[in-house]
Amino acid sequence: MVKPSIIAIDGPAASGKSTLGERLAQRIGYLFFDTGILYRAVTWAALQKLGRVDQEDEVSALSEEVNIDVRPPSITDGRSADVCINGVDITWDIRSSDVDANVSQVSAYPRVRQAMTRLQRRIGQRGGVVMVGRDIGTVVFPEAELKIYLVATVEERARRRYHELTARGEIAEYDQILASLRWRDAYDSGRKLAPLRPAEDAIILDSEGLTIEQVVERALELIEKA
């Protein structure tokens, strides 16, 4: 079987893109690259250095200067990769509620997206990659041979995020997570730059009511057909 060189997986927050991408990459021997971690890393850096993310010029300049590195996992604690800024491991820091609440605003800044898109393309052009994000099939790699758009109801996604946080020992409120995801869906879909939407040739994969193993098997079938 000749596999697609680049597999793009897009979809809304907490739809299971990262889990699907990671397991799919493992099954076919590809690099797993969750592009959302780059925007989370920039958001975390902005909150640390600036204390806020509403200063577009300063956040954008920071995104062009900061040294973000993504490496294979060095610790067996559930992470799919090490995420470092200037040599400091921030893998779990970028999953905080503060980053959750601000990453959409940061990712909407044109210069930030341009800086991160350049990095994503450099990695993807090596081939043999499962790339996960919100605009991979529409902006980053519209030439990708296989584009999957993963969906689930917002209630299901909120439940998944709640269990993810509580499993790590964090305090989480389901209703708060649900409201946050609804706001984020509207924000990501309505932004002028690279809005969240499936590419015209993307295949919609609904994960509602499916186990992750079932979703992976359906994605493998799509690879065979591609």
Image (spheres, rainbow, N blue to C red):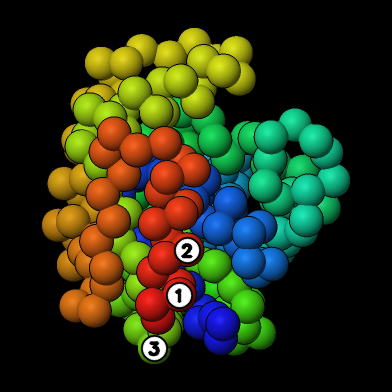
Asked if the residues shown at circle 2 and circle 1 are in contact, with their CB atoms under 8 angstroms apart, the answer is yes
Asked if the residues shown at circle 1 and circle 3 are in contact, with their CB atoms under 8 angstroms apart, the answer is no
Q: Quadrant of the C terminus?
A: bottom left
Q: Which residue is mark 1?
A: 224
- Determine the secondary structure under disc 1: helix
Question: Is residue 2 left or right of 66 when viewed as pictured?
Answer: left
Residue 85, horizontal then vertical, whole percent: 72, 53
Q: Which residue is mark 2?
A: 220
Residue 224, horizontal then vertical, whole percent: 45, 75
Residue 134, horizontal then vertical, whole percent: 35, 61
For disc 1, the neighbor class at 10 Å (few under 14, some 14 to 19, many from 20) is: few
The residue depicted at 78 percent of the width and 56 percent of the height is 72
Q: Is residue 186 visible?
A: yes
Task: Say what amino acid the circle numbered 2 marks.
Answer: Leu
Residues 166 and 44: in front is: 166
The residue depicted at 63 percent of the width and 66 percent of the height is 28
Task: Say what amino acid the circle numbered 1 marks.
Answer: Glu
Q: Is residue 136 visible?
A: no
Real-space Cα distance between discs 2 and 3? 20 Å
Examine the image and state in which quarter residue 76 appears.
top right
Mark toward the viewer: 1 or 3: 1
Question: Is residue 202 left or right of 146 when viewed as pictured?
Answer: left
Q: Earlier in the sequence, mark 2 or mark 3?
A: 3
Q: Quadrant of the N terminus?
A: bottom right
The residue depicted at 34 percent of the width and 49 percent of the height is 104
- Determine the secondary structure under disc 2: helix
Q: Which residue is mark 3?
A: 143
Task: Say what amino acid the circle numbered 3 marks.
Answer: Glu
